[in-house]
Image (cartoon, grey):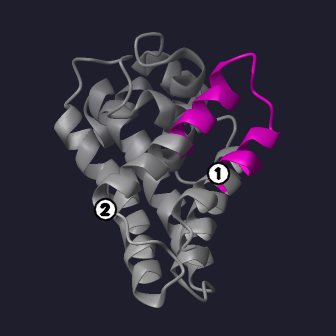
């Protein structure tokens, strides 16, 4: 693993555990086993490192979702795969995924961060849902619904389930399967 990647992995774990305010560049350097100046060299400042940590995680998630979605036979299955892959990614990355919960346009943890910039990155996830919805409406597997609003409602259900599992004492792992069924029932053509 390169030094840059070690820094990024350390940052994702620390931001997940301690949040933006509770994580320093020095602690990240120590966890990564690199000199403090190298963190600044690669990422500039803590805010940029925080954003890169979140963005790279979204990119990895999108790559997994897109790879999995190639097998979808119709739009409803594409949305189902999106939801299932999203939940699987969160489970496979339990130690780092909370970084995305904190680096989110829906998070109040860091009000000083540029929400427009963060929101633009999260838009890529919404766009994937929209593609599945549009495909399903064309192939008849999904009811005719307002695409954008429905994509946001699906994403809100996903985020709600993830936040419940990760951040509350109510975190029943079966919630992901039920959220997935709930979403599919809500959008399936009748």
Residue 37 in the magenta stretch? The answer is: no
Whether residue 34 sits left or right of residue 130 in the image: it is right
Residue at left 56%, top 24%?
14
Seen from the viewer's position, the closer of residues 160 and 42 is 160
Compare residues 88 and 92 and report the one nearer the observer.
Answer: 88
Residue 38 spot, x, y in % from top left: 38, 35
Judging by the rendered image, the residue that carries numbered circle 1 is: 182
Q: How many marks?
A: 2
Magenta region: 158-180
Q: Position of residue 102 (x, y in %)?
A: 45, 27
> Is 114 positioned to the left or the right of 98 in the image?
left
| Residue located beneath label 2 in the image | 146
Between residues 19 and 62, which one lies in front from this camera angle?
A: 62
Does 126 sit above or below residue 161? below
Q: In the picture shown, does residue 19 fall above or below 158? A: above
**2 or 1: tag closer to the N-terminus:** 2
CA gap, disc 2 to disc 1?
A: 18 Å
Q: Residue at x 61, y 76 (%)?
A: 77
Location of residue 25 (image quadrant): top left
- Decide if residue 96 is in sight here: no
Task: Mark yes or no: residue 115 visible.
Answer: yes
Of all residues, the one furthest to the top in this rendering is 22
């Amino acid at each position: 693993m390169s030094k840059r990647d070690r820094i990024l992995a350390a940052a994702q774990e620390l931001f997940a555990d301690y949040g933006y305010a509770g994580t320093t560049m020095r602690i990240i350097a120590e966890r990564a086993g690199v000199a403090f100046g190298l963190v600044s060299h690669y990422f500039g400042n803590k805010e940029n490192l925080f954003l890169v940590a979140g963005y790279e995680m979204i990119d990895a998630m999108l790559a997994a979702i897109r790879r999995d979605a190639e097998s979808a036979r119709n739009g409803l299955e594409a949305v189902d795969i999106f939801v299932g892959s999203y939940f699987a990614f969160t489970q496979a990355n339990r130690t780092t995924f909370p970084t995305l919960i904190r680096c989110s346009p829906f998070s109040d943890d860091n009000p000083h961060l540029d929400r427009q910039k963060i929101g633009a990155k999260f838009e890529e996830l919404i766009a994937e849902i929209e593609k599945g919805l549009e495909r399903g409406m064309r192939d008849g597997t999904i009811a005719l619904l307002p695409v954008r609003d429905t994509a946001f409602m699906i994403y809100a259900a996903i985020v709600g389930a993830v936040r419940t599992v990760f951040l509350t004492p109510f975190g029943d792992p079966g919630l992901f399967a039920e959220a997935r069924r709930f979403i599919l029932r809500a959008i399936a053509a009748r």
